[in-house]
Amino acid sequence: MPIKYGKFEMPEKIKLDEASQTSTFARFIVEPFERGFGHTVGSSLRRIMLASLEAPAILSVKIEGVPHEYMAVEGVIEDMTHIILNLKGTLLRKLSTSEDAHPRDIKLISKALDISQEVIEKAGGSYKVTLKDILAGADYEMVNPDHGIFTVTRPFHKRVDLRISLGRGYVPSERQVSFDPTLDEILIDSAFSPVRLVNYYVENTRVGQDTDFDRLILEVTTDGRIAPAEALTFAAQIGIMHFQVFDIVKTHVVHFDKGEMQTNRDRDEVLSKLALRINEIELSVRSTNCLFNAEIDTIGELVVMPESEMLRFRNFGKKSLTEIKQKLDELGLSLGMDLSKYGIHRDNIKEVIERYLAEKAGEAVL
């Protein structure tokens, strides 16, 4: 027998703070959640992103004629310990797809380096071997292809072998048990996790007249092997997969009340935004003047206008249109918005706003 539960406030979209966004950092703002769910969701996503996402890393290295990590390499400035540290700093990207034989297959990359005296002299007496010198043509995207591995000062003719695989988290060299190392192969600590830092904050946000709902702010920093948005979507799907396990103990089917779209609280929330004056949303002087010249005084009169009609206004260009759309998006509104579910349309928008403001003024007097 189905059980009916009351309505839960749920976010309708995720806002990306584009002003602070970089290739490795993003701030996501999600609201509104019911009280307490900001911490529940934020903590879960943070833990999954830090510990459960996959990326490639180097498992081992073998340089011809170098039997162990505690020795110098002939003709190379750095010793093996330093070379291994440099290899740990390599950043490789590969998203495993259904076409791959197995996501955890270990790839052996073998490169015969042939660095002549002429090449060294052209480089000023020392040639820096970079990641792209070893992995050029391999089945991996190099995030930092110019990352230095070692520096050669004399002719260098040796084979370099690297084992690479996808993995999760951080695996010390002594726990590399997925393959049997060959003679002179040196195991390396592998940092698979592509996420460096995840912070989350929970703030109060308003829904109608209530101010005790949660706004979740997620700050995700990666190392470049995946984008922050990719980290978030992967973590969300991993979390959903694990929650689905508990579906087997379902004793009742729960139906959640979606809530009526024209409840007093929802209508009051929308009208409070529509009643804002144009000069209250901090538009540029040019955009503000264009709207005043078009006799648009409130946000409500603005959102019922289709985008195509806005561009017909005098001195109103695409730059002003982009600015206005961005401001409306921050309010959860848009141009050409369908407000019929609230009994609002283009012909009565001014009347509805005037009536709403009059009612609010009367409440303030009481």
Image (cartoon, rainbow, N blue to C red):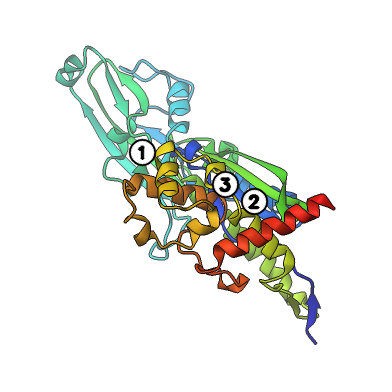
Decide: few, some or many residues near mark 3? Use Cα within 10 Å; few <14, some 14-19, many ≥20.
some
Which is more N-terminal, label 3 or label 1?
A: 3
Give the x, y percent position of residue 200.
66, 42
Give the x, y percent position of residue 360.
73, 55
Which amino acid does the dot numbered 2 rest on? Answer: Leu
Q: Circle 3 — which element?
A: strand
Question: Residue at (51%, 69%) from the top-left corner?
Answer: 347
Which is more N-terminal, label 2 or label 3?
A: 3
Could you tell me if the residues under marks 1 and 3 are in contact, i.e. CB atoms within 8 Å?
no
Cα separation between marks 1 and 3: 41 Å
Which amino acid does the dot numbered 1 rest on? Answer: Asp
Q: Please indicate whether residue 123 sits to the left or right of residue 345 in the image.
A: left
Q: Viewer-proximal residue, 22 or 189?
A: 22
The image quarter containing residue 184 is top left
Q: Viewer-proximal residue, 186 or 315?
A: 315
Q: Please indicate whether residue 5 sits to the left or right of residue 202 in the image.
A: right
Q: Viewer-proximal residue, 301 or 129?
A: 301
Instruction: Say if 87 sits above or below 205 in the image.
Output: above
- Residue under label 2, please give it: 45
The answer to whether residue 37 is visible is: no
Front tag of 1 and 3: 3
The answer to whether residue 153 is visible is: yes
Cα separation between marks 1 and 2: 37 Å
Decide: few, some or many residues near mark 1? Use Cα within 10 Å; few <14, some 14-19, many ≥20.
some
Front tag of 1 and 2: 2
Q: Circle 2 — which element?
A: helix
Question: Residue at (77%, 75%) from the top-left corner?
Answer: 249
- Residue 28's mark? 3
Q: Viewer-proximal residue, 340 or 63?
A: 340
- Residue 150's mark? none
- Residue 161's mark? 1
Could you tell me if the residues under marks 1 and 2 are in contact, i.e. CB atoms within 8 Å?
no
